[in-house]
Every structure is written in structure tokens, then in C-alpha cells.
């Protein structure tokens, strides 16, 4: 399919998804008996309609050809008749013909009359054929216009019900073809009046959500793509600066971003932003949205400084043009907070999240979906800061409100339950975490389907909880299933697939299956560098994971080389104060200690602890881990008294913050007893 065709289709599909989510958020009555997936029969029906449209186009072309033939024959016959009559008049007027020539003239005249009659008959037949083709075309067009408009709209409603139950539409390589076909037909096959009516219906409300979810079964796509391309080449509008075109380009960029094709997404977002600023102005709401979208793509690529700059500009412009209480302004503030959080600037992130939550509760109400999302975002920031009790309280409140206002099966409710489970897991309350994860997985499989991206994530989360509990066989089984499903449904290069492969490698490593772990880690690193780029944060994480596997295998030189490279890149790309940079420094220190380079290890551990206390705070779980690591290095150097002092301080803090039964607390207690020689 041509690039232009793909662009238009993707944009139309994304616009359709947005409206579906909007209708779902407004609690449109859903057909609970509808299938949760778009069936191949729907696509075949759509293909049949496309074939009918193509046949109509062919009839039109044949009709035009026959009209042309009729006109040509008529002109030739008229010209021949005029020539013959002129010759006859000349001959009669001159009266100079010989008797011998009159016979030849009579024969020629007779032949001319026969030719004229044949030409006239051909013209009549051609005209008759053209009229028959015209009647057939009108009949087919009439049948199409009378029989398919309501049927096509009913199909729209059916698709809306199906997708609304799943809270959106996916953006994978199959491009949710059923919905693309539906919107394509509205744009191409309907009359101008029908297009205007449906456009009013589709654009009657503002889009309020982006949630790329859902799935479509794999079907034979070749003929469908050919049919779509056939029509798109005939129907594509040349309106490159039209707001709908800009929106379509932005939607396609969002699809690329969700697929992990970040370079392509950034290119389209940059083009859309430039065109929006030129045609709509820098203060237009669509321009602000385009700037925010580009910032989100930069953030996904790890280009955090550029993302923050754009987010700050968007927030300032939104406050100036829309007002501080406008929903788009609240969203801009939340986006900037998320970027701050990704950079490790947690205090600034929490401040913005708190402000956004307060404003959302005041302007939108405590039960509004955006308010629930704001509360969840603040909880996530608290969790990142190690303020786990506060995070759990907010997560519990968000889950209760989601179940009450949205229902227990709503995707946002499932996400809230998963978030609470993650907080329980971080606190060491693993039994409660596993219970919630199991419930979330069962509900996701029932309501969204086993292949839905959220279902895959739920399965992976449950596997992680099993791994934390030491139930490694169960964890590996779930990880293997998730990886296989991700490769089948999302593709081998999708970011979620790469994460699934890394998770399985971690489980293999925990089981001591180090060769298998290293193989998967090496594959994941190569794929992330190829797909995301070697400077992407995900690539840095993959390099660190591979180094850890090398270290576990005793390949310390290779481990140290990778750790040193990862630390240098983290400091350059993320900054020396980023939490991932602190983790990289700690990992390198552990490798130095394992090699017997204890003095170098102590230097790095001391630096990491000082930075953690300054950046994350003395009570953050990562700070406790840094203090425990330094105590272990002191013990390895023979500085036992210093080691015991640090262990005692860390144990007291861990019991106070994480609880006496937390796995980390138990480990610190064991290390302290070992240092004391007990």
C-alpha cells in the first residue's frame, strides 16, 4: 500500500478510536452480548462492499468508453455522408459522366449507402449499450445508497460496542483493519450529504482520551489492502493543511509511538507541529496539543531535556490562553510532572502532581476520570520516592472510587487494582499483591481477551510477584506465555515484547539458568539498540542486565566493561543525579567488589549513598539499599565496626519504613548477624 494510503488509513483509524473511547467514557449503553473481537466475517463483508464500489467504478469507466465510441462513430458517419452527397451533387450538376462510368458511380453510391446504414446501426447499438450500462450503474448505485447506509452505520454501532467494552483500539502492525475499513467507507463511499451527516456525528464532542488498547484477529489482508489502495488513489483529498489532515498525521504518529517506531513518530509530530504553528497559530489548542505530543515522543526516546522544555512551554501557553483551570492545562501540568519524575526530579514532580490533583478535584469533581488519574499519578510519585504508606492510601482510594464510578470491569479500574498490587509488592506484602494480580489477570482475560496488551501486562505483573515470592517455576511459565503472546500479537520488535524477553531472562537468571538468561539478554540488547537506539534508557537497562548476568556467570571482566560503559552513558544522557545513574554506579561498585577491587567499590558506594540521601532522601528504599551495600563493602575491607554501625542504622530504618517482615529487612538483619559473627 502506498505511504499516502497508509497515512490516511492510520489517521482515520485513530480518529475512530478516539470517538470510541469518548463514547465509552460517557457510558454509552453497551451490548454485553457482542463479541469482544472483530471477526473475519466483518472484514469479508467490508471487502464485499469495497468490491461492489470497485465494480461501480468499472461500470462508470465502461460507460464513458461506450459514450466515446458512439460519438466517434456518429462523427465518422456524418462526415462520410456529407462527402458522398457533395460528390453526388457535383456529378449531377456537371452532367459530364460517361455511360460507362455511371455503372461504377451507382455501385459506389450503393456501397456508400450501405456503409452509412452500418455506421448508423453501430451508433444506435453503442448508444443502447451505453444506456444499458447507465441503467445498470444507476441501479447498483441506488441499491448501494439505499441498502448500505443504515447497514454501514449499524456496523459502526456494533464496532463501537465491541471496542467500547475493551476501552479503545490497538496500534499494532495489523492496524485494527476492521475499524479502518469502517471509517474508510464513510470517507470514500458515501455521498457528500451522508459524509457531512456522519462528520457532524463524529465531531460533535471533543476527544477526551487516548488509550490504545484492543485487538483484531489476523485475517487475509492482501486483497483488502489492494481494494483500499484502489479507492484511496481515486478519493484522496489534497488538503495537507486542513485541521483534519493535521489531526490524522498526529494520530498516525501516536500509532508509530505505541509501536515503538519512535523515529517515525517524532518526524510526523515535528511536521504536524510546524504545520499547526504556520496554519493555526502558536496559541491554537491544536498547536498546544501537537507540542505536547512531540514532547511525549521525546520523553519516550529518553530525550528528557527536550521533552521538559516543550512541556514547560506548553504549560505556560495553556495557562496564558486557556486559563489555569482548563482541562488541557491540567493535563499539561501532569505531563510536565511525569517528565520531571522520569528525570528523577521527584520533589518537583510531586509538587505539580499535588497541584493538579487539587485543581482537578475543585474544577472537575472528585469522581471525574481525570481526577482519578491525577490521584493515581500522585500515588506513583509517592511510591517512586519511597513514601509507600502514602502511595498505598491513594491507590486504595482510587481503586474504591473507580469501582464505584466506572465499574469493576472498566479498564481504568483494572489498572487501579494493578497499581495497588504493585505498591503492596514494593512494601513486601506479597500475598496481598499476588491476590490482586490474580484477580486483575482473570478480569482482564474475561473482559479484554487473552491477547489484549493490558492482559499481557497483567500476566507479566503476576509473574513478577511469583518471582519475588520465590515461586520461580510459576513465574517462568507465565513469562514464557507472555513472551510468546507478545511476539505473536505485537511483533518481535515491539517495546512490550522486548520487555517480556528481558523479564524471562531475569527469571532464568534467578533460577540459575544463566546460559539461557545471557542468550535472551544479548538478544534483547541487540534488538533495543536496533529499534530504540543505543542512547535510549531501555538500551541502558538492557546493557546493565547483561552485565549482571555476566557477573553471575563469573565473567567479571566483561561485566565490568559493560557496567563502566553504562555508567558513563547514564551520566551523559540522564545526568549524574538520575535514579538510573545511581543504580548504575552501585552496580559497578558491586562488580569491583566481586573482583576484589574493594577500595574502588567503597569509593563508588560512598558516592552513591551520599547522592541517594541528597536526591531521594534518607528513607527511600534505594537509599537503604545503598547504605546496606556500603556496610557490606566495609565488612569486606575488614572495617567491621563501621559495617556493624551502618547495618544497625539500616535495619532500624528498614523496620520503620518497610516493616519487620519485609524481604529487604530480613536480608539486612541476616547481614548484621553475619557481621557480628553471630
Image: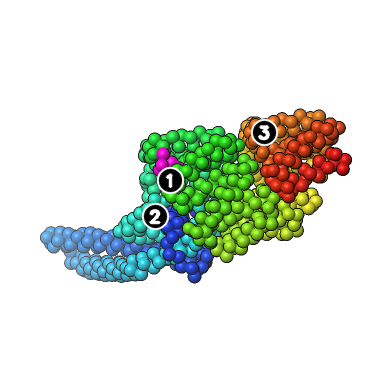
Question: Is residue 522 at least partly visible in the picture?
Answer: no
Q: Which residue is mark 2?
A: 234
Q: Give yes or no for contact between labels 3 and 1 (Cβ–Cβ under 8 Å).
A: no
Q: Which residue is mark 3?
A: 613
Count all numbered tags in the image, as a single digit: 3
Is residue 523 or residue 427 the one in the foreground?
427
Q: Which residues are magenta?
A: 324-330
Q: Measuring from the top left, give residue 395's x and y in whole percent.
A: 57, 51
Helix, strand or loop for disc 2 = helix
Q: Measuring from the top left, give residue 535's x and y in whole percent.
A: 63, 37
Residue at horizontal 43 percent and vertical 60 percent from the top: 27
Residue furthest to the right: 677
- Going by the image, does 345 lie left or right of 5? right
- Going by the image, does 61 lie left or right of 6? left
Q: Measuring from the top left, give residue 271's x and y in whole percent.
A: 46, 40
Q: Is residue 567 above or below residue 111?
A: above
Q: Give yes or no for contact between labels 2 and 3 (Cβ–Cβ under 8 Å).
A: no
Q: Is residue 510 above or below residue 306?
A: below
Comparing marks 2 and 3, which lies closer to the viewer?
A: 3
Comes first in the chain, label 2 or label 3: 2
**What mark, if any, has residue 362 been given in the picture?**
1
What kind of colouring is applied to the model shown? rainbow
Comes first in the chain, label 3 or label 1: 1
Comes first in the chain, label 1 or label 2: 2
Amino acid at each position: 500500500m502506498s505511504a499516502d494510503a497508509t497515512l490516511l488509513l492510520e489517521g482515520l483509524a485513530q480518529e475512530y478510536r478516539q470517538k470510541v473511547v469518548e463514547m465509552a467514557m460517557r457510558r454509552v449503553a453497551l451490548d454485553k452480548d457482542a463479541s469482544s473481537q472483530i471477526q473475519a466475517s466483518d472484514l469479508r463483508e467490508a471487502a464485499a462492499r469495497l468490491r461492489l464500489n470497485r465494480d461501480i467504478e468499472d461500470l462508470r469507466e465502461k460507460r464513458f468508453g461506450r459514450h466515446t465510441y458512439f460519438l466517434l462513430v456518429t462523427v465518422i458517419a456524418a462526415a462520410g455522408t456529407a462527402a458522398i452527397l457533395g460528390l453526388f451533387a457535383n456529378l449531377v450538376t456537371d452532367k459530364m459522366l460517361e455511360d460507362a462510368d455511371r455503372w461504377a458511380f451507382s455501385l459506389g453510391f450503393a456501397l456508400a449507402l450501405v456503409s452509412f446504414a452500418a455506421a448508423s446501426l453501430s451508433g444506435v447499438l453503442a448508444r443502447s449499450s451505453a444506456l444499458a450500462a447507465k441503467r445498470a450503474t444507476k441501479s447498483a448505485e441506488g441499491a448501494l445508497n439505499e441498502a448500505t447506509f443504515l447497514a454501514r452505520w449499524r456496523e459502526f454501532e456494533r464496532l463501537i460496542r465491541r471496542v467500547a467494552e475493551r476501552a479503545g483500539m490497538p496500534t499494532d502492525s495489523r492496524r485494527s483493519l476492521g475499524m479502518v475499513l469502517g471509517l474508510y467507507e464513510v470517507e470514500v463511499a458515501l455521498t457528500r450529504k451522508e459524509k457531512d451527516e456522519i462528520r457532524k456525528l463524529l465531531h460533535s464532542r471533543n476527544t477526551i482520551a487516548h488509550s490504545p488498547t484492543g485487538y483484531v484477529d489476523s485475517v487475509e489482508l492482501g486483497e483488502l489492502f489492494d481494494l483500499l489502495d484502489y479507492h484511496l488513489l481515486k478519493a484522496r483529498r489534497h488538503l495537507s493543511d486542513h485541521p483534519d489532515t493535521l489531526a490524522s498525521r498526529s494520530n498516525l504518529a501516536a500509532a508509530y509511538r505505541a509501536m515503538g517506531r519512535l523515529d517515525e513518530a517524532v518526524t510526523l509530530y515535528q511536521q504536524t507541529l510546524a504545520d499547526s504553528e504556520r496554519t493555526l497559530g502558536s496559541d491554537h489548542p491544536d498547536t498546544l496539543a501537537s507540542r505536547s505530543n512531540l514532547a511525549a515522543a521525546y520523553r519516550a526516546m529518553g530525550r528528557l531535556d527536550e521533552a521538559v522544555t516543550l512541556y514547560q512551554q506548553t504549560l505556560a501557553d495553556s495557562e496564558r490562553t486557556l486559563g489555569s483551570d482548563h482541562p488541557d492545562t491540567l493535563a499539561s501540568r501532569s505531563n510536565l510532572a511525569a517528565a520531571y519524575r522520569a528525570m528523577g526530579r521527584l520533589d518537583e514532580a510531586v509538587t505539580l502532581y499535588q497541584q493538579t490533583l487539587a485543581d482537578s478535584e475543585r474544577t472537575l469533581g472528585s469522581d471525574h476520570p481525570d481526577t482519578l488519574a491525577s490521584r493515581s499519578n500522585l500515588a506513583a510519585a509517592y511510591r517512586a520516592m519511597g513514601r509507600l504508606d502514602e502511595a498505598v492510601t491513594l491507590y486504595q482510594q482510587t481503586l474504591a472510587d473507580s469501582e464505584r464510578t466506572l465499574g469493576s470491569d472498566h479498564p481504568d479500574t483494572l489498572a487501579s487494582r494493578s497499581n495497588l498490587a504493585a505498591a503492596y509488592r514494593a512494601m513486601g506484602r506479597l500475598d496481598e499483591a499476588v491476590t490482586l494480580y490474580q484477580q486483575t489477570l482473570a478480569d482482564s482475560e474475561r473482559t479484554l481477551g487473552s491477547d489484549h496488551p493490558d492482559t499481557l501486562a497483567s500476566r507479566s505483573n503476576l509473574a513478577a510477584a511469583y518471582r519475588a515470592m520465590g515461586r520461580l517455576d510459576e513465574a517462568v511459565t507465565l513469562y514464557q506465555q507472555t513472551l510468546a503472546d507478545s511476539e505473536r500479537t505485537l511483533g518481535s520488535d515491539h517495546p512490550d515484547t522486548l520487555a517480556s524477553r528481558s523479564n524471562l531472562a531475569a527469571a532464568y537468571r534467578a533460577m540459575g539458568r544463566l546460559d539461557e538468561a545471557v542468550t535472551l539478554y544479548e538478544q534483547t540488547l541487540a534488538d533495543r539498540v536496533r529499534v530504540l537506539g543505543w542512547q535510549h534508557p531501555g538500551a541502558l537497562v538492557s546493557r546493565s542486565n547483561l552485565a549482571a548476568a555476566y557477573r553471575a556467570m563469573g565473567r567479571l571482566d566483561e561485566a565490568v566493561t559493560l557496567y563502566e560503559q553504562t555508567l558513563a552513558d547514564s551520566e551523559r544522557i540522564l545526568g549524574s543525579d538520575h535514579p538510573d545513574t545511581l543504580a548504575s554506579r552501585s552496580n559497578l561498585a558491586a562488580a569491583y567488589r566481586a573482583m576484589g577491587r574493594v577500595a574502588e567499590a567503597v569509593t563508588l558506594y560512598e558516592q552513591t549513598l551520599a547522592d541517594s540521601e541528597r536526591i531521594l532522601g534518607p528513607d527511600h528504599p534505594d537509599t537503604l539499599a545503598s547504605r546496606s551495600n556500603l556496610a557490606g563493602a566495609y565488612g569486606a575491607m575488614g572495617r567491621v565496626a563501621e559495617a556493624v554501625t551502618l547495618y544497625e542504622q539500616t535495619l532500624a530504618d528498614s523496620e520503620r519504613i518497610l516493616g519487620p517482615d519485609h524481604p529487604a529487612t530480613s536480608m539486612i538483619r541476616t547481614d548484621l548477624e553475619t557481621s557480628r559473627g553471630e
